[in-house]
Image (spheres, rainbow, N blue to C red):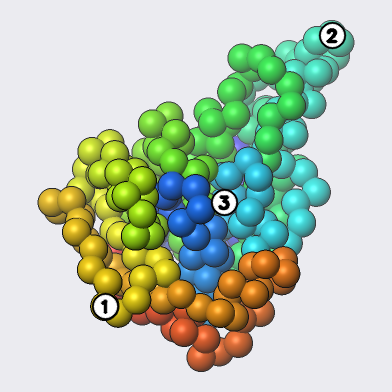
Amino acid sequence: MPLEKLGNHAAAPRPAPQVIAVCGKGGVGKTAFSALLSRVLIDSGVSPLLLVDADPVGGLTSAIGERAVETLAGVRDHFIAEARRGGKSGAADAAQLLEYSLLKALVERKGYALLAMGHNGEKGCFCPANKLLRSAIEGLVPSFAAVVIDAEAGIEQINRDVTERVTRVVAVVDASQRSLDTLRMIVEMVGPSRVGVVANRFSAAETLSLPDGATLLGQVPEDVALRQFDREGWPLWQLPEGNPALEAVRHVAAVLRKDLA
C-alpha cells in the first residue's frame, strides 16, 4: 500500500504505535468510551490518531460527529458486484483491493483519521470483511501515533483475530452478570496481561471482581450530561471540560499511556 497517497498521515517513519481495541458486551457504553478516549488522546497531543469504527452499526462515527461517505464493507460489496458482472474490478488482487479501500474509505481530519467498517450487503468470499479490516489496520498503523478501535459488540472480532496486532484490549463492563461473563471470555481469548478493564456507570460504592491477571484501569460514573448527549444524538466530543465522565476517561488514558510507555 503506497502510504504516501494518504496525505499528512504518511509522513516520516514513527515508533511502533499503541493499538487499543475497546471491547465489551453490547450496551455497556463501549462506543461512548471509545469516543471520549479518542478526544482525550488527541487533546493530550497523541497525533495523528487513527479511529477505527469496527462496529457495523457505525456508532463511533456518529458519536464523534462524523459521517463516513464510504466504508470498507461498501467498497468490498462494490468489488463483489463488479466481479459478478464480469467487470475488471472483480479480477483485482488483495493488494489492489486494500489500496482502493483505504483511499476510498479513509476520512482524514486535522489530528486524526477515521476508518469505518460498515455493514456488508453483498455475500461472498471475496476478501471477507474482517480479513479486509485486519489488512487495512496492518497497512495503516505505521503511519499513526496511536490507534483506537471501537470493536464489534461481544468478542467476535477478537475470535477472528482482527485484533491480533493490538497492544492493549480495553474491556468496558457494567455491573450486569452478562457483561462480566463477556469479560471473562475476552480474558480467556487474549490473555489477562493484555486486558485492561473500565467499569462504566459504576458508583464509588460499587466494587468489581476481576478475572485473575486483568487490570482495572478506572471507573466512569453515570453521567446525566453524557446520557442526554447520547439520547439526543449530539457529538460526545462536544461535552464540556470538567464533565465527570470525561475527567474519568482522562484518568484512564493517563493510566493507559503510562502502562504502554
User: In the image, 169: left or right of 239?
Assistant: left
Q: CA distance from mark 3 to mark 2?
A: 32 Å
- In terms of image quadrants, where is residue 190? top left
Q: Secondary structure at mark 2?
A: loop
Report the mark closest to the observer, 1 or 2: 1
When the figure is inspected, residue 28 is found, relative to residue 73, above or below; the finding is below
Q: Quadrant of the N terminus?
A: top right
Label placed on residue 86:
2
Q: CA distance from mark 3 to mark 1?
A: 34 Å
In this view of the protein, can residue 251 be seen by the observer? yes
Q: Residue at x 26, y 78 (%)?
A: 205
Q: Quadrant of the C terminus?
A: bottom left
Label placed on residue 205:
1
User: Which residue is at the front of the view, 83 or 10?
Assistant: 83
So how many labels did they put on this image?
Answer: 3
**Residue 96 position within the rendered picture, expressed as x and y whole percent measured from the top left:** 67, 28
The residue indicated by pointer 3 is 52
The residue type indicated by label 3 comes to Val
User: In the image, 104: left or right of 30?
Assistant: right
User: In the image, 260: left or right of 49?
Assistant: left
The residue type indicated by label 1 comes to Ala
